[in-house]
DNA sequence: AGGCACTCGTGAGCACGTTCACAAAGCAGC
DNA sequence: GCTGCTTTGTGAACGTGCTCACGAGTGCCT
């Protein structure tokens, strides 16, 4: 009867995989699949079946032995666990190249993250309309956050302005930030920050390419430069 | 004498942090800092000092006890380890919202990842020029990859076309892929794939927001839907 | 030269995440 | 109801990564 209080904490690694399962399950559901085994889900998600079962077991025992998982019900449970039972409006700071691409991306709204607003400091950008959303001045940030009950902010400013953008978001009342600028943001402990850094991704790929190419084939010495 | 063959493998977690150190060190170098301690580097990178030292120790013993690390030399070593001693041209598949933002992003070229080409299937997009790069037909992909010696491909097509894009990249000779489409790509084992999925990031933030809000406050029962 | 303050490099212990393997549970057919 | 097949849920083993703590160098000051 009493709703499970203090829900068991779900490991970070699992939380990061749940959205992937969710997407696959949603697709399968749309294709008319009612029931799915951990094996099949693992195959579609590119992971190990035991991992799928362990991950799903953190949500509770929602499978049926000998059969698998009921797709619709599992979708419901994952959505509930991820807090996707209602929309989470986001506000974007920085209406440049990237901010515009984000604002114009329909996938956000569809997945429950409608763009509540986009702000910038550049007068040339303010007032322009990007796929239905008007760019507003950054001073209007607190008002947007409050009236639209926004708790997630997206930083899409140049690196030099990112800390300022984050500070403003925090002051406006946002509690989670998705940061695209290549800087480590300093925020109060209570604020959740995730970073997407394309240069880092490319550099990781570069590491593997370089390694594949025979590693340090002729490692040009290990001597330090003359300087000292 | 013999160049260190079969270099010690660097843990994935460390490889993922090296680019962050590199960026910080480069900035510090530009600001005239010659030497930096693990403590300071850790502070700037938002990590633990012991972790910084352990990470850097995989590159070799390049610090000086009692002093710290020589910034310029460390930058050189990290760049070498990450394979950043030369450029890695990339080819972008999909000249939509995101592909255009990526092509227009100067940061790529600056960091050693010049855009060697961008391709699409849409005749309306082909021939248009985005920040100096002309959009070409996807059939030209093999030619671009070969003449420009591209080993990294970026998938920026809609989800439904991503597997096709990946297949074409692999066939053209690319060995690493950065995938922005929300699908799990199937590729030969030898191909390195990294995925950037904004929806996943937002959903992880949503999980924490939901949890912060008191978790499942009134967990609407755990009964399964009537169906069965 | 000796002592002191500082910081690296790293072994050891711990926490977290992944994989294995199997008992328990459900379903179908008879 | 019993048998056999399938698939879940999970303890146990394993591997990776993180943190601590401290010995070992290094530079500086007296
Ligand atoms: N464009 C890409 O594909 C791409 C790729 C990887 C990373 N990034 C990163 O994303 C960020 C944005 O990139 P971009 O290409 O959109 O840059 P951009 O220069 O096109 O846009 C930045 C926008 O931020 C605005 N801005 C500047 N200071 C601001 C402030 N204090 N508050 C609010 N707005 C402010 C500017 O007016 C501009 O409109 C950068 O940090 C970049 O490194 C972009
Ligand atoms: N725009 C964003 O901010 C954003 C954010 C998150 C994720 N994404 C993802 O990035 C991808 C691209 O998004 P977008 O907004 O740029 O989409 P888009 O529709 O604007 O652009 C897609 C482009 O790919 C081209 N294309 C289609 N099929 C192709 C094929 N087989 N080969 C080559 N090109 C093909 C289309 O002609 C189009 O130009 C999508 O998978 C989307 O989910 C985009």
Image (cartoon, coloured by chain):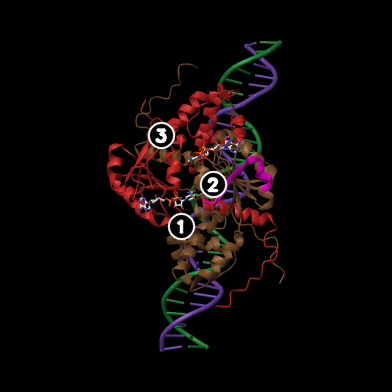
Chain colours: A brown, B red, C purple, D green
Q: Is residue A134 magenta?
A: yes
Q: Total marks drawn?
A: 3
> Could you tell me which secondary element the residue under label 2 belongs to?
strand
Q: Are marks 2 and 3 on the same chain?
A: no
Q: Disc 2, disc 1: CB below 8 Å?
A: no
How packed mark 3 is, by other alpha carbons closer than 10 Å (few <14, some 14-19, many 20 or more), is many
| Residue at position x 51%, y 45% in the image | A100
Mark 1 touches mark 3? (CB < 8 Å): no
Cα–Cα span, label 1 and label 3: 29 Å
Residue B32 disc label: none
The residue pinned by badge 1 equals: A47
- Tag in front: 2 or 3: 2
Which residue is at 56% across, 49% downward?
Answer: A133
Q: Residue A143, image x and y in percent?
A: 68, 47
Q: Are the residues tagged 2 and 3 within 8 Å (C-beta)?
A: no
Pointers 1 and 3 within a single chain? no
- Sequence-first tag of 2 and 1: 1
Name the spot of residue B108 as percent of width and height, x first.
Answer: 44, 36
Instruction: Give the numbered dot on residue B83.
Output: 3
Where in the figure is residue B165, as x and y percent of width and height? 35, 51
Q: Which mark is residue A129?
A: 2
Q: Are marks 2 and 1 on the same chain?
A: yes
């Amino acid at each position: 009867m009493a709703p499970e209080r203090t829900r068991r904490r779900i490991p970070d690694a699992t939380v990061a995989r749940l959205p992937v399962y969710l997407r696959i399950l949603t697709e399968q559901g749309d294709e008319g699949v009612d029931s799915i085994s951990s094996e099949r889900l693992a195959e579609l998600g590119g992971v190990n079946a035991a991992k799928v079962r362990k991950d799903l077991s953190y949500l509770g025992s929602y499978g049926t032995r000998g059969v698998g998982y009921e797709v619709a019900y599992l979708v419901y449970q994952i959505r509930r666990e991820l807090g996707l039972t209602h929309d989470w409006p986001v506000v974007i700071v920085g209406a440049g190249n990237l901010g515009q691409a984000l604002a114009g991306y329909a996938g956000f709204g569809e997945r429950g993250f409608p763009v509540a607003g986009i702000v910038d400091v550049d007068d040339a950008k303010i007032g322009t309309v990007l796929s239905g959303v008007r760019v507003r001045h950054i001073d209007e940030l607190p008002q947007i956050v409050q009236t639209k009950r926004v708790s997630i902010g997206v930083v899409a400013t140049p690196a030099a302005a990112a800390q300022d953008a984050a500070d403003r978001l925090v002051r406006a009342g946002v509690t989670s930030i998705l940061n695209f600028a290549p800087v480590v943001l300093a925020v109060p402990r209570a604020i959740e920050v995730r970073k997407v850094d394309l240069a880092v991704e490319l550099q990781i790929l570069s590491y593997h390419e370089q390694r594949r190419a025979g590693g340090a084939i002729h490692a040009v010495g290990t001597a330090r430069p003359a300087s000292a």
